[in-house]
Amino acid sequence: MVGPIAEPKPGEDGAWYVYKCDAGGTRDALYRPPVWIPDGPQADGGPPAAPAALAEQARSQLRLPSPKIKASPADEQLVTLPTWLWLERDAWRKVTATASVPGVSVTAVARPTSVEWSMGDGGSEVCHGPGTPYRSSEASRQDANPRKPSPDCGYTYHSSSAEQPDNAYRVSATMHWSVTWSGAGESGAFPGLTATSNALFRVTESQAVNTDDQ
């Protein structure tokens, strides 16, 4: 979340600065308000803008992508059948923001580190990456095994969601981000940030078919 916008103090010299972000060429439509930063060193030897203060400004302008939840099976999960979990790849990237005054520039960098999945039935998983998408081409292979688990991020339900509201488990995926900053010959770290998305998973019992003659 963005912290409160600093306002100029009475009689304080400075300027409003427009947010500048470099996220690998990706743009979004989110509005970033201008930021007030006092003037740097003056001819009379006044104090320079502190890099740590600029780092706070840069951190407040970080805009983390919302992770979009994906799973296989896509429509309904089955009891005892492994569920593959993953996030869309464009969410798993570093995000940067820069705050500057004349002569001083500081950049904050957020990097994804893990995803904590809460599966709605009391179970959870922690994955140290976005997860591996399940390809439809794998399912079409003659030797495909539907009980093959995800190589890096998955979960297996052991009870259906029939007794849950809307007949579905409420699932959340929380991305954890480390945040560092550097500039003007200094560097540091901030407490981590998180971004969470939610989804509903319907889990049903698989029905066995008895073909024995009676």
Image (cartoon, grey):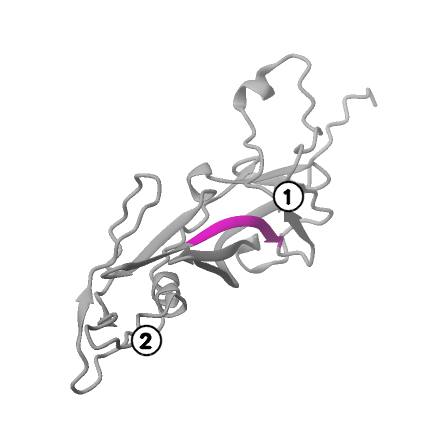
Nearer-the-camera pick, 211 or 81: 81
Residue extending farthest to the top is: 142
Nearer-the-camera pick, 17 or 129: 17
- Residue sitting at 81 percent across and 21 percent down? 212
Nearer-the-camera pick, 58 or 201: 58
Looking at the image, is 172 positioned above or below residue 56? above
Q: Identify the element where label 1 is drawn.
A: strand
Residue extending farthest to the front is: 44
Q: Position of residue 88 (x, y in %)?
A: 46, 39
Q: Position of residue 151 (x, y in %)?
A: 67, 32
Report if residue 37 lies within the magenta region.
Answer: no
Question: Does label 2 or label 1 sit earlier along the sequence?
Answer: 2
Report if residue 110 lies within the magenta region.
Answer: yes
- Relative side of 43 to 132, left or right: left
Quarter of the view holding residue 120: bottom right
- Circle 2 sits on which residue? 4
Q: Position of residue 102 (x, y in %)?
A: 22, 61
Quarter of the view holding residue 13: bottom left
- Relative side of 206 to 85, left or right: right
Which corner quadrant holds the C terminus?
top right
Checking the image for residue 93, the label placed there is none
- Residue sitting at 65 percent across and 37 percent down? 152
Looking at the image, is 202 positioned above or below residue 120? above
Q: Identify the element where label 2 is drawn.
A: loop
Main secondary structure found in the magenta portion? strand
Which corner quadrant holds the N terminus?
bottom left
Q: Position of residue 38 (x, y in %)?
A: 24, 74
- Circle 1 sits on which residue? 204
Please state the extent of the stretch shown in magenta in the rendering: 109-119
- Residue sitting at 66 percent across and 19 percent down? 144
For the residue marked with disc 1, what is the amino acid? Thr
